[in-house]
Structure formats: structure tokens, C-alpha cells
Amino acid sequence: MCPVCRARFRGASECSRCGADLTTVMTLVAAAWRMRQAARQAIVDNDPGRARMLASEAEAICHTPAGERLQALSSWLAA
Ligand SMILES: [Zn+2]
């Protein structure tokens, strides 16, 4: 969501309601997405410690329900 007016984030680089520049937000969302992809790959590669680190980092940047499940799964696998 837009950090200025809390409008729903629609994937555009400018907020549709208040016109705020959301480039940084998009960059962070994309970075978190790549980290989750890398975390999933780490699970496939049987490296749960790395998966947990990547999933936790992704959650710290951008929380999503799926990201939370990925973090929980990788933590369980790493334990
Ligand atoms: Zn806004």
C-alpha cells in the first residue's frame, strides 16, 4: 500500500490516489519477491538454513501471507 495515503498498491510507479512516487516501494517488493524465489530454490537444493535466512529477510522487507508460510516452513525444516 502507499506509504503516504495508505491507498492500495496497484503495481504502478505512482500512487493512483495521491501521486506519490512509489519507485522505492516497487524496488523493495521486487527484492522481497526474488528473495522468496531464492528461498524456495534453497529448499529444493536441501539448504533449509539458507532458505530460512532468505525468507526471514524477505518478510522483514515486505510481509505477505505466503511469505509468512514460507518463513514458517523453512524455519521448521532448518530446526
Ligand atoms: Zn498515495
Image (cartoon, rainbow, N blue to C red):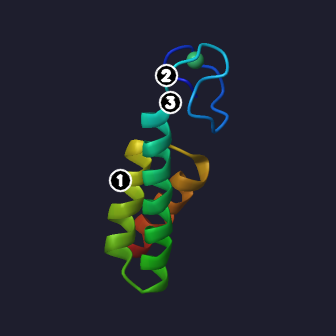
Q: Label 1, on which residue? A: 57
Which residue is drawn at the image coordinates 46% and 59% (left, top)? 71
In this view, the mark in front (1 or 3) = 3
Q: Label 3, on which residue? A: 22
- When asked about the image quadrant of residue 1, the answer is top right
- Sequence-wise, the earlier of marks 2 and 1 is 2
User: Where does residue 56 sit, x and y in percent of width and height?
Assistant: 38, 55
Whether tag 2 and tag 1 are in contact, CB under 8 A, the answer is no
- Sequence-wise, the earlier of marks 1 and 3 is 3
In this view, the mark in front (3 or 2) = 3
Judge the density around disc 1: few (<14), some (14-19), many (≥20) Cα neighbours within 10 Å: some
Judge the density around disc 2: few (<14), some (14-19), many (≥20) Cα neighbours within 10 Å: few
User: Where does residue 19 sit, x and y in percent of width and height?
Assistant: 58, 17
Q: Label 2, on which residue? A: 3
| Image height of 17 relative to 13, above or below | above
Disc 2 marks a residue whose amino acid type is Pro
Mark 2 within 8 Å of ligand 1, using the beta carbon: yes
Mark 3 within 8 Å of ligand 1, using the beta carbon: yes
